Amino acid sequence: MKFKHAVVITGSIGSGKSAVCELLRDRGFEIIDADKISHDVLDRCAVQVAEIFGAQYVVQKDAQAENLGLHAEFRVSSGEEISSAPCVLVDRKKLGELVFKNPAELAKLEALLHPKITAEILSRARALEAKGKLYFVDIPLFFEGKRHEFFDKVAVVYAPKDTLISRVMKRNGLDHAAAKHRVELQTDIEQKRAMADFVIDNSGDLAALKAAVERFLKELKDKI
């Protein structure tokens, strides 16, 4: 099934997909956020994470909320069982340090999460498709996740590799080598740019990005 009213927003870590989606929300468009879905799914799979990777990669919800001032939000997909106790959450930082250094561990995590994440994305897409209006699906790992059979219009948020590395260093508090490694775990941004139907350039400042989004929407309107 192809979702004819959907346009995927993708790119690379540090390219600015979230900023683009915020600008699209400001214009009144609905967004399916795969990152938010993945976080929810990850916490629902906390028990499995502990079984696969070890109990040190989960924390008690109350302790995390007290330390970070956050309240956990649990959303259950239609027909999907809650697969972890509601008092347990995944320690994303600690788990990230493990999987980003070890491709085999990353593959284990992806095998656990990706089918559930894909099912949730498709469920929400079906609901929005029924409205008959343009909407966007923010999928950071679209090309890596092989979801081409569902979506056929793809916009890549682009910035050069050096810019991506600098942004990841600043945002994640990483040194150059660690940030470069994170960027290179994903498909090269130039390859993604070549595969895209639309390119939103985010190599400049916010004003330039706003102008790029306006150009993108005009191009989209002309083509669909």
Image: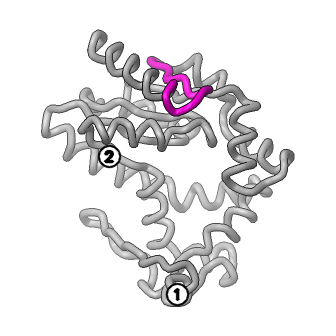
- The residue furthest front is 207
Whole-percent x, y for residue 187 in the image: 66, 33
x then y, percent, for residue 33: 40, 49
Tell me the quarter of the image containing the C terminus: top left
Residue 142 horizontal side relative to residue 8, left or right: right
Local SS, label 1: helix
Looking at the image, do the residues carrying marks 2 and 1 touch, with CB atoms under 8 Å apart? Answer: no
**Residue 7: image x %, image y %?**
35, 30
Please provide the residue range marked out in magenta: 197-208
The circle drawn on residue 122 is: 2
Q: For the point 70% across and 46% down, which residue is it?
A: 168
Question: Compared with residue 200, is residue 175 higher up or lower down, i.e. above or below?
Answer: below
Residue 148 in picture, x, y percent from top left: 44, 31
* Residue at image coords 24%, 38%: 28
Q: Residue at x 34, y 36 (%)?
A: 24
Looking at the picture, tell me which residue is in the foreground, 49 or 71: 71
Vertical position of residue 57 compared to residue 77: above or below: below
Give the residue type at disc 2. Answer: Leu
- Report the amino acid beneath label 1: Glu
Mark 2 and mark 1 lie on one chain; the one further toward the N terminus is: 1
Find out whether residue 204 is within the magenta segment: yes
Label ID, residue 66: 1
